[in-house]
Image: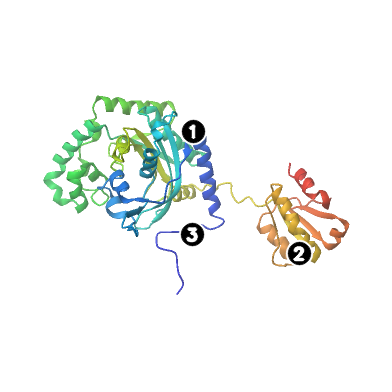
């Protein structure tokens, strides 16, 4: 029996992986302009980090984590998201003491959640995320949202919708929590078991339930907007002002509830409006999480961030019919005729590559026609043809594949002349 890939994972093959590299490089480039620096954390962490940091009432912790016990009888978990690990590193390495504040970080790598696989959603997926730690200024909220939108726009996506909400501060959430409990308690028996358990722990999470989203009590549930105190209202108004100043269109949705327990104040999602994208339209989610750093054992440090999966990014590009500028081909393909010429191209190929060119040669002892077809498949810009006769005369024939123009070049100065051709 052949061994196949585990369910919910995927192989990203040559021809497709270039799209991933392009997105990753573009995101890195933009993060550099916004002064966000890369951080890399372990793929597995102590399970307690996620139960405390993500929240034990979340679907991630309750249902989706890949947790195992190692030989030292320690409970470890493959990371299901990137924020908790980033904040853990921020605390452990005392980055809060850095003179450069706020600390602005980005990460990229595989995450793991035991979910039902569907279009654009996998059990192992690659997440890109950003965290800004150390500032309570609503302007940093606008900057983080602006960075997310800039990454999407830089790759040509246009059919985007930004949804924002305020989850308020502790005082506002406490008032809203009491109102939600009063609203749901008399009929909580009509809801799923998850909602029943969330009623006492975190009733706001009931609003995020997919199973009972059409229940009449969901539509009439108290809105967090009505329970924001003066400080929270002012904060949210500032975020909206900055987004307006940055010419970033948005819609306020009082029902937007992020799925992780550590969020407060600003919450947002970026969705795709592209036709045929699918039922799950969310591309990116994020928000402010004042209190998470203390939960993980650090000093009081406000933070805000976002994350998106590369898989769903590519799905959005496909839905809008956007072709990324990848797979451009190679600079030169060396065609050889004769044993001595074939041997000579081994060194010549290396010289081309060390000079900065992408180049290839035949390794299957194919005839000239088959070698030319191989060059065409690789979308070679030039083909350099060397036979034993040319080798004896110390020349090489170079053909521009698009125009068909051909010229003979001195073999000793081939690499230098080839550089001139490509200027």
Q: Nearer the viewer, mark 2 or mark 3?
A: 3
Residue 11 image point, x, y percent: 48, 59
Q: Residue furthest left?
A: 186
Using the image as rendered, state which of residue 129 and residue 325 is in the foreground. Answer: 129
Label 3: element kind: loop
- Dot 1 crowding, Cα within 10 Å, few <14, some 14–19, many 20+: few
How much space separates mark 1 and mark 3, taking CA atoms? Answer: 33 Å
Label 2 close to label 3 by CB (< 8 Å)? no
Q: Is 282 left, or right, of 393 in this rendering?
A: left
Residue 302: % across, % down: 34, 32
Alpha-carbon distance for marks 2 and 3? 34 Å
Circle 2 sits on which residue?
368
- Residue 155 visible to the viewer: no
Identify the residue under disc 3.
11
Point 48% across, 42% down: residue: 157
Q: Which residue is mark 1?
A: 35
Residue 336: x and y in percent read 77, 61
Q: Which quadrant of the structure image shows residue 145? A: top left
Q: Which is nearer the N-term, disc 1 or disc 3? A: 3
Q: Quadrant of the N terminus?
A: bottom left
Name above or below for residue 305 compared with residue 109. Answer: above
Q: Which residue reaches farthest front?
A: 72
């Amino acid at each position: 029996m052949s061994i196949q890939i585990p369910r919910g994972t995927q192989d990203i093959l040559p021809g497709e992986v270039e799209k991933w590299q392009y997105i990753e490089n573009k995101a890195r480039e933009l993060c550099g302009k916004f002064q966000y620096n890369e951080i890399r954390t372990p793929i597995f962490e102590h399970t307690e980090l996620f139960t405390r940091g993500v929240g034990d009432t979340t679907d991630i912790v309750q249902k989706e984590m890949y947790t195992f016990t190692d030989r030292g009888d320690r409970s470890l978990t493959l990371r299901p998201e990137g924020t908790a690990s980033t904040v853990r590193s921020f605390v452990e390495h005392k980055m809060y003491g850095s003179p450069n504040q706020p600390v602005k970080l980005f990460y990229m790598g595989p995450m793991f959640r035991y979910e039902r696989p569907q279009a654009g959603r996998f059990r192992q997926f690659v997440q890109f995320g950003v965290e800004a730690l150390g500032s309570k200024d609503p302007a940093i909220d606008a900057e983080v949202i602006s960075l997310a939108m800039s990454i999407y726009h830089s790759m040509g996506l246009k059919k985007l919708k930004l949804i924002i909400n305020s989850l308020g501060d502790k005082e506002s959430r406490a008032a809203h929590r009491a109102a939600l409990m009063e609203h749901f308690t008399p009929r909580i028996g009509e809801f799923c078991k998850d909602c029943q358990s969330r009623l006492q722990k975190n009733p706001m999470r009931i609003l995020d339930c997919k199973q009972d989203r059409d229940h009449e009590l969901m539509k009439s549930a108290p809105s967090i907007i009505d329970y924001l105190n003066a400080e929270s209202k002012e904060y949210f108004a500032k975020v909206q002002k900055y987004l307006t100043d940055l010419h970033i269109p948005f819609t306020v949705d009082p029902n937007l509830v992020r799925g992780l327990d550590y969020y407060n104040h600003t919450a947002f999602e970026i969705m795709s409006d592209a036709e045929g994208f699918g039922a799950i339209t969310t591309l990116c989610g994020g928000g402010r999480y004042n209190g998470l750093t203390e939960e993980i054992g650090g000093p009081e440090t406000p933070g805000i961030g976002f994350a998106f999966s590369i898989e769903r990014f590519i799905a959005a590009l496909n839905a809008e019919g956007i072709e990324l500028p990848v797979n451009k081909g190679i600079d030169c393909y060396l065609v050889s005729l004769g044993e001595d010429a074939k041997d000579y191209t081994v060194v010549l190929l290396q010289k081309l590559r060390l000079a900065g060119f992408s180049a290839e040669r035949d390794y299957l002892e194919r005839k000239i026609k088959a070698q030319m077809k191989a060059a065409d498949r690789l979308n070679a810009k030039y083909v350099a043809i060397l036979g034993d006769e040319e080798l004896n005369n110390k020349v090489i024939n170079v053909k521009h594949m698009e125009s068909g123009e051909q010229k003979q070049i001195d073999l000793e100065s081939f690499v230098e002349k080839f550089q001139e051709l490509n200027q």
